[in-house]
Each structure stands twice: as structure tokens, then as C-alpha cells.
Amino acid sequence: MTHDDGDHPRPPAPDPAPRVLCDTGSLTPPDDETAGALWRLAEPGRQLDANVVLLPPARRVAPHTEPDLDVLLLIVAGEGTLISTRGTQTLGTGSVAWLPHGSTRGLVAGEAGMSYLTVHRRRPGMQIRPARP
């Protein structure tokens, strides 16, 4: 048995096993084509977060800056545009984009909409911190 630096016993790690979690081809959007997550990685003890997100036709994710996390983006259906401070790039089914931390990025779905998988390091839990001066 191992001990953490507080000398409290830790339970043994479970035996991890690879497994299929989702078939993105079988995900069905809601009838009203609401934007949002169609699937989320929810495995306990994970180090990653992942989502399959639907962006209906002509809908957008406004440009924003992610200060802490690199994000990998895989287009699983449809097409659209990646917007950055360096211009725009076309995305189609199978496109893989790296969105480095600190970059400003936005998305616009094409005429048929766009579904995409995002993968990034899991965010740490909420922490109570002193107020900034």
C-alpha cells in the first residue's frame, strides 16, 4: 500500500482497461437542433475531458481566449470555419485542429451544421482562493 505525503493510506488503483465509449456515427441531434454536447467523457479518475458538440447550421461559438488548456478539435460530421487572430481556416469532416492555450479561437458551422470532438486536460476542481488585491 502506498501513502501520500499526509501519511493517509490510498486505496489501490483500479485495474484500468481500454474500452469503446461512444460511436459518434450513432449520436443523434435533438429534434430542435439545439447546440450543445451530444456526449461527454464521464469516467471516474480520468485525466482528460472530452465532448462531442453539435453546432447547428450557421450557429457560432464566439471568439474567445482559453488561457490554460490546449484543446484538440476533430470534426466528426459537417463542415465549418475556425476563426483566429490569424484569419479563418476551413474545417471539414476529418479535420483535426490544435487550439493552443492562450490562443483566441471561434467556430462557425456551415450550411449543414457541424459536430466536433474536443479533448483537453481535465480542469482542476474549483478552489477557494483569497481575493485579489
Image (spheres, rainbow, N blue to C red):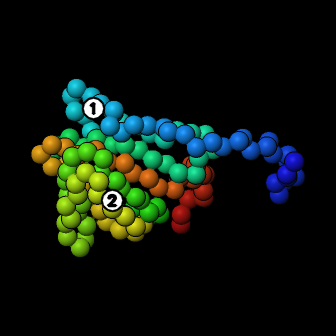
Q: For label 2, count other residues whose C-alpha is less than 10 Å away and answer few (under 14), some (14-19) or many (20+).
A: some
Q: Tell me the tag on residue 122.
A: none
Q: CA distance from mark 2 to mark 1?
A: 22 Å
Per the image, the residue denoted by label 1 is 29
Most extreme residue toward the left is 111
- Identify the image quadrant of residue 63: bottom left
Residue at image position (56%, 59%) is: 131
- Out of 125 and 108, give the one closest to the viewer: 108
Label 2, on which residue? Answer: 96
Which amino acid lies under the numbered mark 2 shown in the image of this protein? Val
Residue 126, image x and y in percent?
Answer: 57, 49
Residue lying farthest to the top in this orientation: 31
Position in image of residue 109 (x %, y %): 19, 49
Give above or below for 102 relative to 23: below
In the rendered image, the vertical position of residue 13 relative to residue 89, given as above or below: above
Looking at the image, tell me whether mark 2 or mark 1 is earlier in sequence order.
1
Which residue is drawn at the image coordinates 29% and 62% (left, top)? 105
Does residue 35 appear in the picture of this structure? yes
Quarter of the view holding residue 115: top left
Q: Amino acid at mark 1?
A: Pro
**Quarter of the figure with residue 57:** top left
Coordinates of residue 44 in the picture (x, y in percent): 61, 40
